[in-house]
Image (cartoon, rainbow, N blue to C red):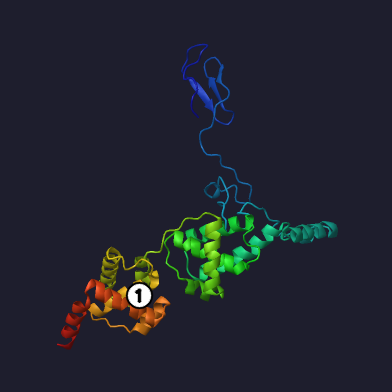
């Protein structure tokens, strides 16, 4: 409590008593109530459950709002009663009827969100996405439903498009092939839906950086840290030479890893690299030739081969 007078205005005494429960300051000498409307500046601890007597369990608020629930986590729920046998037959039927109506959602948007957000959580868990990406994708889907963008499209394709947009915004590398595997929706349909919702919702997304895929691909191929570092260096040189513009980020990243593996004597086949990156061997071969020609890397590969023969 702050802001009260530290001296009695009646007798001038400084012997004051602060009653925090009543919000009053009383002079002990003459009994004058010096202040009667003190403001409590501390936290407002309130609790209404069975553990309210335990000071350590008291909370100021409940769980935070989240777009991963159809009501953003603000709804209430009729809970289970352990003493149902003590209720009369009429009250028991009323209780069960209230619980039944609790799960009946009134509006079409809420029904759509309840189903779609469950699918979104499933796909997000399958792809091992961070909570921030899941929350962002749920917000994008909610906005799409409120704007009527889901009409005429399957719920799963819009969920996948929202997840892909959130991954791109948070720079979490996930390919359309991975989303197709997780959602069983064709990647062309996911790409079309992704472009549609980002355009309609004015979501600005920067082009994918091929370097974002290096760590994941290198881990799957079991390449060394030196090879991974070399692949990043090759990508930086390729960007300076403008070899990455107009080309798929996964293909150029996979080709850079393939070249880096060869220069460090960690040979991997084009088939292995293509399977990890989700591209064709032809794509790896074409990007590989471009990197060798433009960056003059063929001499480094030949030196590595000679060392390995020795």
Q: How many marks?
A: 1
Drawn side of residue 193 relative to residue 103, left or right: left
Residue in the foreground of this view, choosing between 8 and 244: 244
Q: Residue at x 54, y 14 (%)?
A: 30
Name the side, left or right, on which 7 lies relative to 45.
Answer: left
In this orientation, which residue lies closer to the viewer: 52 or 39? 39
Does the rendering let one see residue 135? no
Q: Residue furthest bottom?
A: 309
- Residue 8 image position (x, y, % from top left): 50, 15
In depth, the one of 128 and 64 nearer the eye is: 128
Which quadrant of the figure has residue 83? bottom right
**Residue that lies at the very extreme toward the left in this rendered image:** 310
What is the quadrant of residue 36 in the picture? top right
x then y, percent, for residue 133: 48, 60
- 98 or 163, which lies in front? 163
Please provide percent x and percent y for residue 272: 37, 83
Residue linked to disc 1: 254
Disc 1 secondary structure class? helix
Q: Residue furthest right?
A: 90
Percent of width and height locating residue 52: 60, 48
Asked if residue 23 is positioned above or below residue 199 in the image, the reply reads above
Picture layout, residue 17 above or below residue 49? above
Q: Which residue is painted at 85% across and 58% down in the image?
A: 90
Residue 196 vs 299, above or below: the answer is above
Locate the C terminus by quadrant: bottom left
- At a point 62% along the width and 67% down the height, the residue shown is 155
In the rendered image, the residue lying farthest to the top is 11
> 10 Å neighbourhood of mark 1: few (<14), some, or many (≥20)?
many
Please report the residue visible at 45 percent of the width from the left and 69 percent of the height from the top: 174
């Amino acid at each position: 409590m702050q802001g009260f007078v530290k001296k009695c205005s009646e007798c001038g005494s400084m012997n004051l008593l602060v009653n925090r429960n009543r919000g009053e300051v009383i002079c002990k000498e003459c009994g004058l109530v010096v202040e009667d409307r003190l403001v409590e500046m501390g936290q407002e601890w309130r609790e209404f459950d069975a553990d309210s007597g335990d000071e350590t369990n008291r909370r100021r608020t409940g769980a935070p709002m989240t777009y991963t629930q159809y009501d953003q986590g603000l709804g209430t729920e009729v809970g289970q009663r352990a003493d149902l046998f003590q209720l009369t037959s009429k009250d028991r039927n009323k209780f069960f009827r209230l619980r039944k109506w609790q799960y009946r959602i009134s509006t079409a948007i809420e029904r759509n969100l309840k189903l779609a957000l469950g699918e979104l959580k499933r796909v997000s868990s399958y792809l091992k996405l961070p909570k921030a990406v899941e929350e962002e994708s749920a917000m994008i889907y909610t906005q799409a439903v409120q704007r009527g963008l889901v009409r005429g499209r399957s719920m799963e394709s819009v969920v996948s498009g929202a997840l892909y947009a959130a991954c791109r915004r948070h720079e979490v590398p996930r390919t359309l092939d991975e989303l197709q595997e997780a959602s069983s929706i064709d990647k062309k349909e996911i790409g079309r839906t992704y472009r549609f919702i980002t355009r309609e919702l004015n979501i600005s997304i920067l082009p994918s950086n091929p370097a974002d895929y290096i760590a994941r691909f290198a881990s799957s191929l079991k390449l060394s840290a030196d090879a991974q570092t070399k692949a990043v260096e090759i990508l930086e040189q390729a960007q300076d030479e403008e070899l990455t513009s107009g080309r798929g980020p996964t293909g150029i990243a996979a080709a850079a890893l393939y070249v880096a593996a060869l220069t460090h004597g960690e040979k991997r086949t084009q088939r292995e690299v293509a399977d990890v990156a989700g591209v064709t061997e032809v794509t790896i071969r074409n990007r590989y030739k471009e990197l060798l020609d433009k960056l003059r890397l063929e001499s480094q590969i030949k030196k590595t081969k000679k060392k390995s023969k020795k």
